[in-house]
Amino acid sequence: MDLLNINNLRIEFPSRHGTVVAVDDVSLSVQPGEVLGVVGESGAGKSTIGNAVIGLLEPPGEMTAGHVLLKSEQIDTLNPEAKRKIRGRRIGMIFQDPLTSLDPLQTIEQQLVETIDLHLKLGEKKSQERAVDLLRQVGIPDPENRIKNYPHQFSGGMRQRVVIALALCAEPEVIIADEPTTALDVSIQAQILELMRRLCKDKQVGMIIITHDMGVIADITDRVAVMYRGKVVEEGTTAKILGDPDHPYTQSLISAVPRPDIRLRRFPMVNYIEAEGERSRNIDLSTHWLGRHRDFEAVDGPLLSLKDLVMTFVTKPAFFKRNRSTFNAVDGVSFDINEGEVFGLVGESGSGKSTVARMVCSLYKPAAGEVNFSGTDLTKIRSENERDFFRRQMQMIFQDPFSSLNGRMRVMDIIAEPIRFHQLASSNQEVEQIVNDLLDHVGLGAQASVRFPHEFSGGQRQRISIARALATRPRFLICDEPTSALDVSIQAQILNLLKDLQEELGLTMLFISHDLPVIRQMCDRVGVMKQGKLLEVSATEDLFEKPTAAYTRELLDLMPRLDKLSHEGLEVEGA
Amino acid sequence: MEQVTPATKTRLQRFFGSDVWYSFMRSPVAIISAIVTIGMILAAIFAPWIAPNNPFDLASISIMDGNLPPAWESAGDSRFLLGTDDQGRGVLSTILYGARISLIVGFFSVIFSMVVGIALGLISGYAGGRTDALIMRIADIQLSFPAILIALLVDGVARGVLPSELHTDISIYVLIFAIGISGWVQYARTVRGSTLVEKNKEYVQAARVIGIRPLTILRRHILPNVMGPVMVIATIHLAIAIITEATLSFLGVGVPPTTPSLGTLIRIGNEYLFSGDWWITIFPGITLVVLVLAVNLLGDWMRDALNPKLR
């Protein structure tokens, strides 16, 4: 007998622009002790399924067909009161953000004991013992004392453990985990997944894990359902789906996952996603505006050379200098980037890698050190007009495609702004022609220029960002986590585009990412940062094969194992 | 990519397709208060043409018509629908002309506050540091006085400094300045808050990487993105400004009695309230309440419609 059955589920969201079918004819089942993964990209409807099962579908969404069975008992038609009793007692939930799923005003004890007493009616004493026991099971050291603490006294990973304890405390039969590790650093993700899997096996709980991350799927699940636009397109054992997928969507999804162990020449065409506007090749770069004036004065030695760069932030502002307290976000960083090279900078959040990028392009003024660009120390430049000469040669692509474009401007004006500012074209007509060509060149099509940013998806917006960065005809491009806000298949498209542009235009790049597999695909040399310090710089292959710093080894060990993924259709570089 | 809809929509087409217009059409309160507000504004603008008689034309008014009750009462006169005041001016006509003064003072003082507040807020938020601290401390100091007190103070100083006949001529400008200067703090604080959020967004950083100068960034990039909340405050502030003007005029420090506003009318009528001539004060009072209520409800709706959290 199946533990949980979802049959022919259909969920609709009526809106004034017509009804959106978020989930369409989805059937899933979970056995006791089994971990089922539901994987898909944003908008695939995977979270909606989870919410429907626990009866927390947000209005105006409604189930218009199908039913949910828990041990053959239909639960979707129950009244809200009965549903509330099932939630927590028979179906436990783990949400994405451990910061918001605990009540900050109550101690862990209060929250756990209340839930246990409510569902199991053990009495206060027994409930307390059980709470301590649960905390021990999820690996919280010294549970007798820590239980008296408030949520803010725990770290992110510890808090997610508490959330798991909370989900387990009423001995539920099924646990639904919606992106349980997305908000956590890689090092903690591995431990939490391991814990969840062990508890699931020990207690014979059925678990549904909803995620966009193939690494999580590979680490923990027994079976996988792949969702695409509200439908389950393929379902099977994890080994089968990852190693030998049948459906073209699954195949393209898996081929788009950056691998830590191999370097691809390009990501194979991922055409199952939003149609990539055909990149037009009708621009002849040797004669076109974009290709002209690329004969920058040659430099002796590296194009960019950082020497002992320091950045200090004020952590406690005050009117008088002596009352301020400060913190060094970047502490003595030096490295060189040669012309035509892609240099990667990798590190966890807060390691200072973005701060380095912002100092290079003069967004921040370094507290000490030198930024030498083509032989000139940028930190010594005082006049804005003098700086403009270097700004034109150096552009940046940002992380968040939703905030990097001004929503009040048309795409035409956004891309034309740098051309007009640096007076790179002689007439308005020429500017418009250039913008249209640029849009064509990044695969959007010239008709995009009259529209506003909100009419585009995240991947398309990132293309607009890239077009804007190219509009000054730069020789040096800084990419600050350019794909970490994007779905994996969109990420593959954008990485392809960046690779192509880099080759066509001979760009030099500083590529910043927290994602080692992405770094491996993109970079020639890599620097590893931790807490504002640069630990090691080496060629990409060397870094992955024989890292020197202990911290690098640690990072490499924590990467999700993706060696089970199918290699079909991949062009491996150097193989 | 989804099908490209005929891409060049005009601004008007985009407005009618927007969520704000949709929410407006779904809210009876918003529609009614918009109709009332616009109706009153039009009536005030076209007062010289629609008023049944001109209360300021000394040739046409007669003291003999003084203190007539509204037309439907037995002693009423059909020429004066809402009765007359002590000098024989029709109450309906004086209300139309009075609303004109009230609205002019309201609108221009709001615009004055807005310009000063937005400019200081943008500078404060974008520059940060000591500039920010200085501007915001001044704002805090001003906030510790009631707005009406500041308006009274400014008005009083103006009366003391300017010769009295000159003051009568420019009293309306003094009033606009007094009310305007008492209201800039709210705009400055809101704009500063939004600017702090916007200036850290990546589109502003992108503009800085290009090399765009701070003033252009403020004007072209940040200003359009902080205007939403400003429009909401401006609407609600319009109601407050009209009330402030009425209060000042009621206290006798506002516009001179020769060009009465709604507040002046209420004050004049107040003197006759106990002799039973209620219409002189009640009708301007009702007009003021309806106008302010309509503007306030419109502002309330706008705050909800523009707030992404409430959608």
Image (spheres, coloured by chain):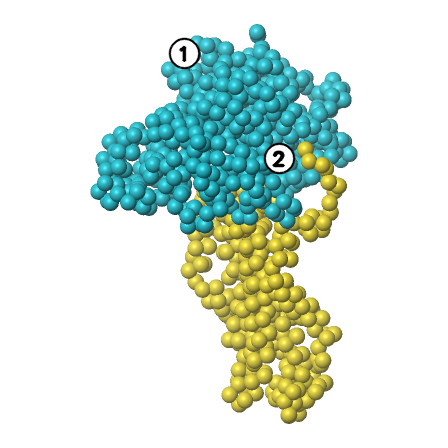
Chain colours: A cyan, B yellow
> Split into 4 quadrants, where in the image is the N terminus of chain B?
top right
Residue at horizontal 40 percent and vertical 42 percent from the top: A87
Residue at horizontal 53 percent and vertical 90 percent from the top: B275
Q: Is residue B105 left or right of residue A169?
A: right
Disc ID at residue A548: 1
Q: Is residue B77 left or right of residue A200?
A: right
- To the question of a shared chain for discs 2 and 1, the answer is yes
Foreground residue among A136 and B254: A136
Disc 1 element: loop
Residue A246 locus on image (x, y percent): 59, 20
Residue A568 locus on image (x, y percent): 59, 14
Q: Chain of mark 1?
A: A
Q: Foreground mark, 2 or 1?
A: 2
Q: Is residue B19 visible?
A: yes
User: Mark 2 = which residue?
Assistant: A457
Count numbered badges in the picture. Answer: 2
